[in-house]
Amino acid sequence: MSLIPKETVDQILAQADITEVVGDFVSLKKKGQNMWACCPFHHEKSPSFSVSPAKGIYKCFGCGKAGNSVQFIMDVEGTSFPEALKYLAKKYGIEVPEDNPTPEYAKEQSERDSLFIVSDFANKHFQERLHKHDHGSIGQSYLKQRGLSGNTIRKFELGYSLDEWTDLTDTALKAGYQQKYLEATGLTIVKEEGKKFDRFRGRVMFPIHNVSGRVIGFGARTLKSNDKKSPKYLNSPESDIYHKSNVLYGLYQAKQALRMQDMCYMVEGYLDVLSLHQGGIENVVASSGTSLTEGQIKLIARYTQNITVLYDGDAAGIKASLRGIDLILENGLNVDVVTFPEGEDPDSYIQKVGDTAFKTYLKEHAQDFISFKTSLYAAEAKGNPVRKAEAIREVVTSIAKIPDSIKRTVFFRSCSLIFDIDEQVLISEYNKMQLQERQQPKTGSPELDQMHFPEEVEPEKPASDTDVLVRYEREIVRMLLNYPDRMLEEGMTTCQYMLEQLEDVEFRTPLYSRFMELIKEKLCDSVVPTAEDFINYPDQEIRTEATNLLSDPHELSHNWETHSIFVPTELDLLPYGAERAVLRLKWRNVELLMKTEMEKLRLVTDPQEQDRQLNTILMLKTLHSQLGDMLGIVVNR
């Protein structure tokens, strides 16, 4: 691992605001003291992802993901700990000096960074060719012809590749960039005989950015109208930094608007994004001609749960893309559809009618996807009973993708009216589909699998001795993390009380034993341990569990205070709670000791040793009974 100096790490952790960091990826809404959102790591219908500004942590009570700002970047971007620190350092303008990276990490990081660096070089090269080279006027003329302003061209960093075989390759090699990285990013193509040439030639260049704003690939449009051999659009191939199924064109420029507007407009092409963005509709992204993927849908879901798909007027194209919409429904997002007059696409139509009229058109013509699909198929099947039956099944298939049962019910009713068919028939067809799906290997949504046909629940097994002990040890550590310096009585903090009471108790769960050791180390240095010590601890297991222990899914409503109703909190009852937690752990440990000693007794044959063993067991039984009495536990004697 790369060694970033501790003082720099501390500076990053101090400045990284959890709300700002998470807010770059999901739309947070305040509820009580915390901020809430639908989790960016798994599909859910109602928010269970909590961010605590006061504690500097996030926690999903659905999938269990938890941590601080650094861990969030690691989870959401799939990066290492040092890479996440660098991301935050860049965000907050902190310089990161590095010391002694290991050879393995240095090599791996160098390879990946080299791909980003070469892509950035190519991006600047294409921009330079567009704005400063004599032949750049060819690209500029095309972009102006498409109605794009200088501001839009600069904001999206558009460029131009000269119509020459090796312009980029020669320039990059001369500047010291290695050929293997040019080849790895797909910028240079190398033939078996060693001949090399540029992938992009004579094209307007559209750089593709990741969510962080780094260039990871390119889309390119040819300007040769008479060239039938070359494709009109050409994209970078897949690489270690570019995976097209997890990328949306324009997302980097749109992410703030997606959160603010709580809506994502989905279009097909680069120019659709550019024209709409220029027209004031900045919450727009494109799938860049690829079929919509689950990875792309999850990207959108970080910022909003609402998608409006803008279709060209081509009916065949609409039918071909309907499957992608089913995937959006399956992920629980709300989908509207807008179609344009025949022969028009979003780019051409906004150029034709202007920004204001275009926005009005979107508002007036948006309809939910199920109603749109139902009307589309009903019109095609009119007068043909066989096609009508096929159309109904097609629509029911889409409705079945919706996880929300209330939404499904509403759409079944709407569909029954349009098709003029009994609603119960549609529901029966849906249940048949669900039954067939259950009889096959599960490939769909687990929520749908369980919705109408719940599995038989096995009787809950009683908790083992070990499970109970883990729970009691966990409770001790939880209280120490949440209330270490709280006074239980004059001159006695929670930390002092618990460690004094448990001085002779050995924690048996390795993770909680480590927590106790770390707490004791802090106190030996005359420092009271804080939550931040563990949230920001280098070991991920400690960080994750600390976040779990500091997270609470429930908050007391302020309405109780408004109505003058006093409800005691855990803090109000802390002396009682701390005492009970200590007694419970002691009681369980004594119980386990008794079982151990009884097992030993069975193996003892010497009468004197048997007497000693029996005395030990009787003493433990007495202690166990006393602790049980203090806890109000009835113990069989």
Image: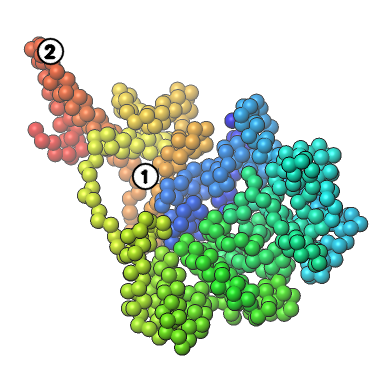
Position of residue 120 measured from the top left corner of the image (x, y, whole percent) = 74, 47
Q: Residue at x 68, y 35 (%)?
A: 110
Q: Answer above or below: position of 396 versus 447.
A: below
> Based on the displayed image, in which of its 4 quarters is residue 585 positioned?
top left
Q: Is residue 534 rendered to the left or right of residue 17?
A: left
Q: Which mark is residue 607?
A: none
Query: Is residue 33 at least partly visible in the picture?
Result: no
Residue linked to disc 2: 609
Farthest bottom residue?
Answer: 383
Question: Tag 1: residue type?
Answer: Leu
Which image quadrant for residue 587?
A: top left
Q: Which residue is mark 1?
A: 571
Q: Position of residue 243 (x, y in %)?
A: 61, 50
Measured as percent of width and height from the top left, residue 439 is found at 32, 60
Quarter in which the C terminus is drawn: top left
Whichever of callouts 1 and 2 sits on the residue coming sooner in the sequence is 1
Count neighbours of disc 2 (C-alpha within 10 A) and say few if under 14, some if 14 to 19, many if 20 or more.
Answer: few
Mark 1 vs mark 2, CA separation in Å = 49 Å
Element under disc 2: helix
Disc 1 is placed on an element classified as: loop
Query: Is label 1 or label 2 in front?
Result: 2
Residue at image point 38% right, 56% down: 442
